[in-house]
Amino acid sequence: MKILLTNDDGYNAPGIQVLYETLRFDHEIVLIAPERERSAVSHSLTLHKPLRMNPIPLKGDDTGYIVTGTPSDCVKLGLFELFSTPPDLVISGINSGCNLGIDINYSGTVAAAREGALNGVFSMAVSIKQGKVVDFKGVSGFIATLVNTLHDDGLPFGTFLNINAPDLLLTDMRGIKITRQASKNLSRQFEKRVDPKNRPYYWYSTPNQGDGEPDTDVTALSQNHISITPIQCDITDYKTIAELKPLLYKTQISGLSP
């Protein structure tokens, strides 16, 4: 299987390196990742300066690529510059730190998987909660099994998987939950500090990850399950389309009618 492997932690982060080592013996892997950490850049693209892509040596005789841009840049360059035919799979991760609920909107890890799905490639984002135990090796083995299990069945166009694992050894995790995206973990907090010149500055605070909503990614992780959430790229609110049509079709606004 041909796999494009990327992340937002940078090409030398332990998560992507361990996953690469796990997959490379059974699959054709192209590792293309940012040259430095690009966390929380969401789906941003580099438009106002040139992108540079440089080869780097990997284990054995393999070659990977580092990119001066974002995770989404990496996927675009990989798909259209490195592959003559589309890969079978895009994997983004393994990210150090979970990407759950509202935070999915900010995540560079998730955005890279979304970019793959937008281009019709089976894609997944993989993250592990930061804690005392971060089992990159165990979760890499789980992903290798999952890839072989799910790939032949595929996903609908524009849908990808967001996968999060708890901060435990794989053998201590309670199992898998198919979940929905939580909606109550939005952080509104900043930690205010004062520098040596008595000027205030701020650090963004991580939200409490225990939301209590049933069947969500946040709840599954808090109960030590691996969460797998199917995410759609199409964010249209179809219910509201149906509600707006009768209101606007009978109302003329500023001389215009729908």
Image (tube, grey):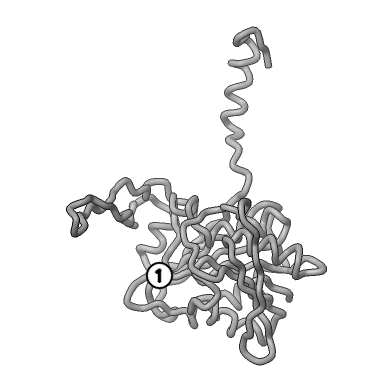
The image shows residue 173 at horizontal and vertical percentages of: 41, 74
Q: On the rendered image, what quadrant is the N terminus found in?
A: bottom right
Q: Pick out the residue farthest to the right.
A: 84
The count of marks equals: 1
On screen, residue 85 above or below 241: below
- The residue shown at (58%, 67%) is 92
**Is the C terminus in the top left, top right, bottom left or bottom right quadrant?**
top right
Residue at 52% in and 78% down: 12
Considering every residue shown, the one lying at the far bottom of the view is 60
- Choose top left, top right, bottom left or bottom right for residue 57: bottom right
| Quadrant of residue 141 within the rendered picture | bottom right
Compared with 187, 98 (above or below) is below
Placement of 24 over or under 104, stated as above or below: below
Which of these two is toward me, 148 or 256? 256
Residue drawn at 41 percent across, 72 percent down: 174
Task: Looking at this view, name the residue that lies furthest to the front.
Answer: 197
**Can you give x and y, in whole percent of width and height, for residue 205 in the image?**
30, 55
Left/right placement of residue 42 relative to residue 222 reads right
Residue 112, position in %: x, y?
59, 60
On the image, the x and y values in percent for residue 76 come to 69, 60
Residue placed under numbered mark 1 in the picture = 166
| Point 38% across, 57% down: residue | 219
Mark 1 lies on a secondary structure that is loop
Q: Is residue 187 left or right of residue 108?
A: left
Q: Amino acid at mark 1?
A: Pro
Q: Is residue 28 left or right of residue 85?
A: left
Circle 1 residues within 10 Å: few <14, some 14–19, many ≥20:
many
